Image (spheres, helix red, strand yellow):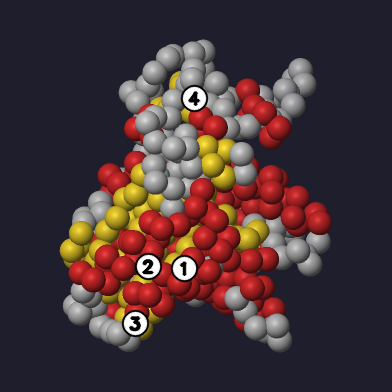
Amino acid sequence: MSAALRLVESDVNAPQNAPYRLLVVGVGGGGCRAARHVAEQLVHGPAVVAVDSDDQALQAVGLPVQLSIGRALTRGFGAGGDAAIGRVAAEDEDVKIRTLVENMDLVFVITTLGGGTGSGAAPAIARIAHEQGALTICFASTPFEFEANRDKDVANEALRQLRMHSDATICLPNQRLLEIVPDQATLKAAFDASDHMISMAVIGIWKLLTETGLIRLNFADLKNLVENSGGACSFGYAEGSGTDKARQATQALLASPLLEHGNVIAQADAFLVNILGGPDLALLDVQQVMSNIQQVARRDAKVFMGATVDEGWKGRLMVTVLAAEHWVAATPLTEKPVQKTVPSEERVAPAAEGQPAAEADIVPAQKELVFEKRDRGRFDKVEPTLYQGEDLDVPTFLRRGIKILVERG
Ligand SMILES: Nc1nc2c(ncn2[C@@H]2O[C@H](COP(=O)(O)OP(=O)(O)OP(=O)(O)O)[C@@H](O)[C@H]2O)c(=O)[nH]1
Ligand SMILES: [Mg+2]
């Protein structure tokens, strides 16, 4: 065992102070730093593991559980921006990664895309976690506009891979941070803000699963939202304090660039809202948050809602939202031949003879639902809500002719 591999299984598999077994895996330089933020803020939280092909970076992050990957390829110096090296580095450690994620209910894979290790290894790790039966949610930042085009291409391809191999991937574009951080912020401050944004997404979900629920959201709700999201979710959060905390938090949430200034909520087929407050959290606060959000949301959107109390949040309130633009309750209608989940414009060309099969050839165990007609459902007898020529009472997936894929029962 190398010095950099300080993988102590008992650390990861130690009993957790939660009804669900949850593992956070930081992948690559930025991913490990963001994972450290999570570990620092959730001292009695989930197990956190740092995975990198750069031993020096692993050491600098200093998380107690680390996995050094790809030594044979990189000699511990990182993947040098090559995602193919990152992917092989993870695949070479398949057995160790499988051991880490086995028996987990939920695995969060955190990465900052654009480099080699995160972009290559994170999709491989997500795939292994998903194969092992864990609900797998990825949090991935994408590079700033000013970063090299090559890094952006690497990030886009990695994002596509993450969506293919996880239950849902939450993309957090660094560019959106520019609206949050001051103009004169240093690059380090911008990355710190990015790390904070990623860690808040993880912490928000952790809290909703573990804190005392006044209005309980559970793992099944999260699973329902995520598994039927078509692979992409958006995340937003905001805080308020004092007597006006509910209004402050919702105003900030709806103005947040993370949710495209409310547009994501306005268009979402389904979303999950968790309100976290102290023991002083009032019913009126919960009511105010929900009514402000529902004023923006579609009337037919599916809403999962929870309110949790944490002693440390006295006088403060945090609203966390996880939104799925395309979501449908999985009720099979018509069975068609098996299809893949990736949109046609993203499909990879078929493998040449003698080459390994491209992922386009992999057939997931899903079947397609076909919706024959534009049914206005319970809005059949009311005036249409027209916006830019579209009837908003007809669910998005019908208006846009989206084919829904559901898992075989
Ligand atoms: N949030 C955040 N993002 C970072 C940080 N460092 C780098 N990034 C972003 O992440 C992208 C990838 O950088 P790294 O995470 O260092 O790359 P890597 O995955 O370690 O890949 P290799 O170093 O090539 O093996 C960069 O293009 C930046 O956009 C960080 O500390 N925090
Ligand atoms: Mg690196």
Tag 4: Cα neighbours inside 10 Å, few (<14), some, or many (≥20)? few
N-term mark: 2 or 4? 2
Q: How far apart are marks 2 and 1 (CA)?
A: 7 Å
Q: What residue type is labelled 2?
A: Val
Quadrant for the C terminus in the image:
top left
Badge 2 or badge 3: first in the primary sequence: 3
- Describe the element under mark 4 as helix, strand or loop: loop
Q: How far apart are marks 2 and 3 (CA)?
A: 14 Å
- If you read the primary sequence from the N terminus, does the residue marked by circle 3 or circle 4 appear first? 3
Q: Nearer the viewer, residue 315 or 293?
A: 293
Dot 1 alpha-carbon crowd within 10 angstroms: few under 14, some 14 to 19, many 20 or more: many
Q: In this view, does 5 lie to the left or right of 117?
A: left
In the image, what residue type sits under mark 4? Arg
Tell me, yes or no, if residue 381 can be seen here: yes
Q: Say whether disc 4 or disc 1 marks the residue closer to the N-terminus.
A: 1
Instruction: Indicate which disc, 2 or 1, sits on the residue closer to the N terminus.
Output: 1
- With 296 as the anchor, is 160 left or right in this view? right
Q: Where is residue 313 in the image (x, y as percent from the top left)?
A: 28, 80
Report the residue marked by disc 1.
253
Residue at image mark 2: 319
Tag 3, which secondary structure?
A: loop
In the rendered view, would you say 285 is above or below 329?
Answer: below
- Select label 4 or label 1 by which is in front: 4
Circle 3: residue type: Asp
- Cα distance in 3D space between marks 3 and 4: 43 Å
Q: Do the residues labelled 3 and 1 touch (CB within 8 Å)?
A: no
Q: Mark 4 points at which residue?
A: 374
Q: Residue at (39%, 42%) from the top-left corner?
A: 300
Question: So how many labels did they put on this image?
Answer: 4
Spatial separation of the CA atoms under disc 3 and disc 1: 14 Å
Can you tell me whether the CB of the residue at mark 2 lies under 8 Å from the nearest atom of ligand 1?
A: no
